[in-house]
Image (spheres, rainbow, N blue to C red):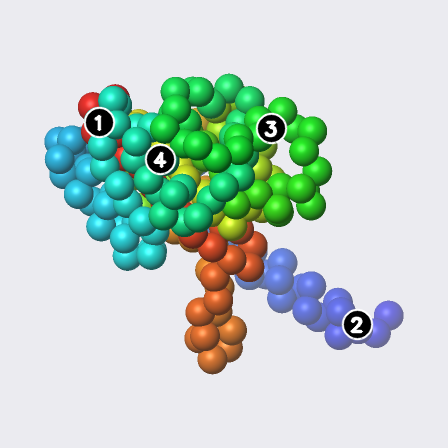
Amino acid sequence: MTATARDTVLGRIRDALALAPAPAPATTVPRAYRTGRTLPDAERLALLTDRLTDYKAQVHTCTRERTAEVIAGVLRERGAHRVGVPAQLDERWLDAYDGEVLTDSGDIPAPALGELDGVVTASAVSCAETGTIFLDGSPDQGRRALSLVPDLHVCVVDLSSVVVGVPEAVARLVPERPTTLISGPSATSDIELERVEGVHGPRTLAVVIRTDA
């Protein structure tokens, strides 16, 4: 029987495999070499602030007692008269705000979310090294649509929840929860590198970092 091109190719593969060295025994890849990194509070705050500012986010630092005052100031500056909040956001955070507040329990349709002037949420954890804020859908953070549809997102971050790197941040998350990663306001660019903001999320991100939480 005449050998075909297929037989020739497969024969060469078999010959090559016969000459190949035996595979090395499987080894466990170490994955803990970058976890557990820490920095003093002041350094984590400075690093996160630098990254967020570079991403064109607004950064405000305050104490716990001034949370409501700072949030109200941000909303007032942006002309936000109607904002949405997650179902279990701390009500005291809006004590100084004199506009309309809509509580979302998942029942506000997306078109109505688009009519809001902004949204105020808490956060789960933040990565100082990359300037990334993680939302995990907890009751004080709400569903993804709530923080992605309105044009302004005011996000409250406790300095105690700010870690150095991504491995430390991921270690604090629950894998089963829906996670949203935020690195500055929504932005994209075309082939000519023309920056466009607000295409797939808020055009303005204001981060309120509570330094004594």
Quick one: 208 or 128, which is closer to the camera? 208
Residue for badge 2: 3
Q: In which image quadrant can residue 194 be found?
A: bottom left
Q: Residue sitting at 62 percent across and 62 percent down?
A: 13
- For badge 4, the amino acid type reads Ile
Under tag 4, what secondary structure? helix
Under tag 3, what secondary structure? strand
128 up-or-down from 121: above or below: below
Residue for badge 3: 104
Whether residues under marks 3 and 4 lie with C-beta atoms below 8 angstroms apart, the answer is: no
100 up-or-down from 115: above or below: above
Query: Where residue 90 sits in the image (x, y, percent)?
Result: 43, 20
Whether residues under marks 3 and 1 lie with C-beta atoms below 8 angstroms apart, the answer is: no
What separation in Å lies between label 4 and label 2 (alpha carbons)?
Answer: 79 Å
Under tag 1, what secondary structure? loop
Residue for badge 4: 71
Query: Where residue 111 sits in the image (x, y, percent)?
Result: 69, 45
Q: Residue sitting at 28 percent across and 45 percent down?
A: 59
Residue for badge 1: 63
Disc on the earlier residue, 3 or 2: 2
- For badge 3, the amino acid type reads Asp
What separation in Å lies between label 3 and label 4 (alpha carbons)?
Answer: 18 Å
Q: Residue sitting at 23 percent across and 37 percent down?
A: 61
What separation in Å lies between label 3 and label 2 (alpha carbons)?
Answer: 71 Å
Q: Nearer the viewer's eye, disc 4 or disc 2?
A: 4
Under tag 2, what secondary structure? loop
- For badge 1, the amino acid type reads Thr
